Image (cartoon, coloured by chain):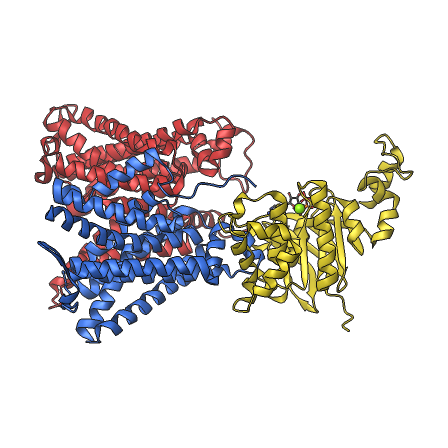
Amino acid sequence: MRKLQFHPCGNYSETYEKEITLFETDFGRAAVLIGLIVLFAVVPFITGPYALYVVNIIGITSIAAIGLNILVGFTGQISLGHGAFVGVGAYAGAIMATTLSLPFWIAVPAAGLVTALVGMVFGVPSLRLKGLYLTIATLAGQFIIEYILVHWEGLTRGTMGIVLPSASLFGIVIEGDRSFFFVIFTALIIMTLAAANIMRTRYGRAFIAIRDNDRAAEGMGIPIFRYKLLAFAVSSFYAGFAGALLAYYMISISTEPFNLGLSVEYLAMIIIGGMGSIAGSIFGATFITVLNEVLRWLTDFLMNSGMLEGMQLNMAPLRELVFGAAIVLFILFEPRGLAEVWRIVRSSFRLWPFSY
Amino acid sequence: MNTIPLLQINNISVVYSDVIQVLKGVSLTVERGTIVSLLGSNGAGKTTTLKAISGLLKPENGRVTDGTIMFDSKTVQNSAPEDITRMGIIQVLEGRQPFKYLTIEENLRVGTATRWGKPYKRDMDMIYEYFPPLIKRRKSLAGYCSGGELQMLVIGRALLAHPKLLLLDEPSLGLAPLVVKEIFRIIRRINEEQGTTIILVEQNAAMALQIAHYGYVMENGKIVMEGKAEELRENPDVREFYLGMAASGTTKSYRNVKSYKRRKRWL
Amino acid sequence: MEFFVQLLVNGISIGFLYGLAAMGFVMIFKSSSVLNFAHGELLAAGAFIFLTLVTWAKIPVFVAFLVTLAGSFLLGFIVERLFLRPLIGEPLIYVIMLTVGLASIFKGLMLLVWGGNLYIYPDFLPSTISLQWGNINIPPVYVVAIIIGLFFLTLFGLFFKYSSQGIYMRSVADNQTASLSLGVNVRRVFALSWAIAALVAGMSGIVLGIINGINVHDLSSVGLKVFPVVILGGLDSIGGAILGGLIIGLLETFTGGYLSPSLRDVIPYIALVFILMVKPYGLFGLVEIERV
Ligand SMILES: Nc1ncnc2c1ncn2[C@@H]1O[C@H](COP(=O)(O)OP(=O)(O)OP(=O)(O)O)[C@@H](O)[C@H]1O
Ligand SMILES: [Mg+2]
């Protein structure tokens, strides 16, 4: 049996493999395993339906947020169209499920692929555009996709929305929050591992090189246009996959949620979670989803308690305010996000009681 | 008559990004009304010294970590460039950096920034008198001017600030020999007529030592030699390494082991 | 024909307002390379300050106009001081997202105070300044919009061409280090460009409010229209911003008038994508001077 590895004090990696390994120690691997066991064996059985719903939404959102982090945090291409891509995925999934009657297990990844294609189309401007111009091109993409979703009625049924048949996997019908929980979180784990592994390959390193200095990356022989397109494709695949899952989970979809606000929300997630950190994407998705729910709950409470009789308080202003404040505060005070906070907390535990 | 030196640099160290130490204890003194020339090979730290004086280290994430810089008996190290320029220190950046999308005249007007609100018409005329080629290009964009015109432009622009201390970083860079001569003649004239104190950083040591009163030689972030300009001109080491002649006046030979040793002694 | 002329006039006046809003945007971008996603909110803020002064405080219209401009100026100044200055030198995405966060905060605050309703200003423009040719009638606000547009255009043209501060602002946009070495107060330039941009935005907000009514959501979405406008004109060209504004304004009104009202809002972005494909740095963007 090989020796269990604990965390050494300092960076003692001797080989490149060691440097890029996912889990530095057996302890870390064990902790993640235990966490997963708790997640699957305990969480779905102790939470009520509402809490489980929130957990599921966090799972789906995390998948899309990881996708955006690959594009923005790792490759440095700022996209303002991620919300629309999630919408494309949702509609692609819904159309495949209804019009084409494809089964769940095909429809969802296929929706991801369709979205990846659409993402690449909007990534094409990155051939000639850099930085700000590209960001603005993705903004245009957001509006154009939104317009198409609403107005191509033959395909999307416009503002009426689409109702999906229930999903089934291996002959088992997936219905209700608990069965969806297992599907969503299995998908999340697979997608997380996939993302972490992409980042360890030469593709991931090329992405990072492009982010850090695209001229130098080009000089080193990285075909940057191809890699930028690839980053758009991968990122949109994640968005589309998440969108299709969402469509199945919500049973019916309409165009409203997939607006610019959603795109901004996704950007906020990766800023608050931590740019260029896969775990950070999940933290950020959790943070924003929970924030949304808390605010919804708070406004309901205030309305019902009659404390604000006469004031037409609704959720929108409060949400905007808190949401904006969260972004601004994180950028000003902890620009590396929750992932950095987590790292600090963890290392102070690890070093306790002898910090330094 | 004020007898304390205009600028006194006392044993400064400069560090970029908190880790890269570039200056390691540089001291130099500049008397009022003189031209002091700062010589040295590429990467010796000449530009860094100038930036330490003018406060332009800050945008490059550099800092004076040790020592003092006294200008007119006030300490100025690590002050904001806005404050330092207002005290009368103006740096002309290496490599001629005009405002490309402004006309020559507008470029010159930016030079009046430290004297905002004061009249500048007479000064403008004076600049055109020093640099006649600029007159007929007044209305054209600086981005389309020749190197010589630009060098005149950036020196003129700096003069409009009425500097007490003018820092010139390699004004001869990339210019034809005749133009270089012309520029140096004007620098000398500015010094004599305006009484402007000048620190002149140069690769072209022969030219620099002709117009300078005093000179310093830098290597690797340290001052390795100093003296009156005429003494430096006669110094065999300087002749050999910066003026490109062997002591006898013939071109130097790299195989000369003795000269290698002499060079080592400085470091 | 009458319909055509009517659309033409509407398009030109809306275009001027877009152009003015875009001009402030370009000013911020030129001096400090910040893409301001809160521009629409600055616009809305101007419209609402004016509304409050006119209807609630009952201040005479002209005074209220001046006070609003002063207030917007101050607002821009404060925003730069408090939020943007600490981020000088940080990566682009943080700066962009900061303005996105600010937009959210402003929007939330305005919704808290004024709600999501549509307000209209009391009718204060004298009907005598409307124009009438045969059957073509141009209402007063369009006349006012065009006059204000031309006035501020000239004003800023002169400011940037001849005033010292204007020249300093252009020098910072051109070469920041060189401006610093000459003692240009770069921080003042940043603050000033935000303040002036907010002032112009506030003014556009008032006029747009007169035309379309005042609503938080509508006005702040104009902030996003600025993007096609500035891309058309080139992100760094102030004159281009006005021309881009005119083109987008006309494109919008004619699409709305002849094709379909629903296409109206998305047509600027479709145009944007085409422009980016063909001329990535806009129609009037500065050609990079590469020599020296
Ligand atoms: N911003 C910076 N960050 C890190 N290192 C720097 C920076 N600027 C300069 N250096 C380093 O400092 C050293 C001295 O540079 P400096 O520009 O002062 O040299 P110099 O004497 O002016 O050379 P030259 O004659 O080529 O202009 C160089 O080794 C350079 O690499
Ligand atoms: Mg130098």
Q: x%, y% of residue C190?
A: 44, 59
Residue A322 in sight in this render: no
Instruction: Pick the residue in front: A322 or B126.
Output: B126
Please give the name of the residue rendered at 50% of the width and 28% of the height, measured from the top-left corner. A17
Q: According to the rendering, which colour does chain A have?
A: red
Q: x%, y% of residue B161?
A: 60, 62
**Seen in the image, is C143 located left or right of residue B166?**
left
Q: In which quarter of the image is residue B254?
A: top right
**Seen in the image, is A320 located left or right of residue A327?**
left
Please give the name of the residue rendered at 39% of the width and 54% of the height, measured from the top-left corner. C27
**Number of numbered labels in the structure image:** 0
Q: x%, y% of residue A185?
A: 25, 35
**Seen in the image, is B50 located left or right of residue A272?**
right
**Seen in the image, is B106 located left or right of residue A77?**
right
Instruction: Please say if A237 is above or below B48.
Output: above
Q: x%, y% of residue A175?
A: 12, 34
Instruction: Pick the residue in front: A293 or A325.
Output: A325
Can you say which quadrant of the picture contains the C terminus of chain C?
Answer: top right
Please give the name of the residue rendered at 38% of the width and 31% of the height, measured from the top-left corner. A127
Q: Which chain identifier belongs to the blue chain?
A: C
Q: Which chain identifier belongs to the yellow chain?
A: B
Q: Quadrant of residue B73?
A: bottom right
Residue at the farthest right position: B248
Instruction: Pick the residue in front: C34 or B26.
Output: C34
Residue C275 in sight in this render: yes
Instruction: Pick the residue in front: C105 or B96.
Output: B96
Please give the name of the residue rendered at 17% of the width and 30% of the height, measured from the top-left corner. A93
Can you say which quadrant of the picture contains the N terminus of chain C?
Answer: top left
